Amino acid sequence: MITSTSQKQEFYRALVEKDPAYDGIFFAGIKTTGIFCHATCTARKPKFENCDFFLSAEEALLAGFRPCKICRPLSFPHTIPEEVQMLVREVERNPEKRWQEADFSKLGLHSATARRKFKTIYGMTFVQYARARRMGMAFKEIMEGSRVIDQQLSLGYESSSGFNDAFTKIMGNPAKKADIRVVNAHFISTPIGRMLSLSDENYLYLLEFVDRRGLEREIEKLRQKHNFRIIHGQNSINQELERQLGRYFQKEPIDFSIPLYMDGSAFQKQVWAILASIPAGTTLSYRDIARELGNKDKVRAVGNANGANQIAILIPCHRVIKTDGELGGYGGGIQRKKYLLELERQAVKA
């Protein structure tokens, strides 16, 4: 999401003036209607304060907005094949649906066809599209439902029957009815995308970019394992986390001091401890970490533990590279990995 005031004002002017030069450059999310549009939409223009601006459709979807039916922002600048239009309609008919191979067959399509055509037109696969729409709805329900939940909690409700979970419709109920633990979901804007944190007053349990592949499963596992009920809200941990991340992205020297809940096996915790010890501005290879653990043949196991990390940046898995010096993968995307490594190099030199 765009956070620069000057750029937001520029995009708002383009939206008001229906400037065709900006079609495909940004997407405008309209808070009052829950839709997102491109610049030349003919619908009545909202007030500036009711607009969010995004550089990609996926960002707008993950923020909980749905495509406008007037300007059809997902169709620009392409002529959309009927199969793709049909799939978009199906997603809007049942946004919570998790698509299986059989679902495509019922529509007379093959999943590979949907994946290829969506990737060509939108720059993301159909599964990414459906997931972004589903996750965006979940995030939106957290934010909209939290006020009701907070009010009911303040009145003394302690059981799951006392209030409605904002994630229930999309991600299911906690495993047990009793001993529910309430955690706060908080969204943090960064120069490389929005992040989601899950925390209570004791620990940070998760910090991920909202478009990370597999985030939905990570949240589900945490909910089931710890019987979490997730609501939107502030607490001392996520407030301090946002402050420290702000300093980090401003290239200020920062030693993160957030209490972390390390939810993994003994081996994974060993790997994460090594990750946390890698100085900013430097890197280690997977083989380096395996050697430090006493077994140079555990490179694959180290890679798996690295990928299982649920606390981005603070447990800096982005500082791990391949033995040949190549960057390798990163759950948040290779461009973010490059950005973070360069940011830290500049911060160390400053």
Image: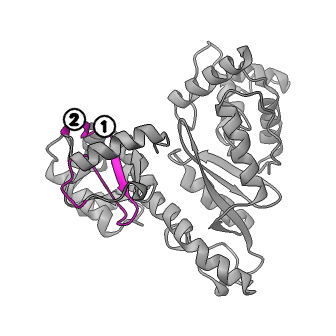
- In percent of width and height, residue 319 lies at 68, 25
In this rendering, the answer to whether 172 lies above or below 284 is below
For disc 1, the marked residue is 25
Closer to us: 116 or 144: 144
Q: Which residue is mark 2?
A: 21
Under circle 1, the secondary element is: loop
Q: Which numbered disc, 1 or 2, marks the residue closer to the eye?
A: 2
Q: If the image is split into quadrants, where does the C terminus sit? A: top right
Q: Is residue 16 left or right of residue 313?
A: left
Q: Is residue 338 magenta?
A: no
Amino acid type of the residue tagged 1 in the rendering: Ile
Asked whether the viewer can see residue 125, the reply is no
Disc 1 to disc 2, C-alpha distance: 8 Å
Mark 1 neighbour class, 10 Å CA radius: few under 14, some 14 to 19, many 20 or more: few
> From the viewer's perspective, is 215 left or right of 273?
left
Q: Main secondary structure of the magenta part?
A: loop
Disc 2 residue crowd, few under 14, some 14–19, many 20+, Cα 10 Å: few
Q: Are marks 1 and 2 in contact (CB under 8 Å)?
A: yes
Magenta residues? 20-44
Which of the two residues, 106 or 183, is positioned nearer the viewer here?
183
| Whether residue 274 is visible | yes
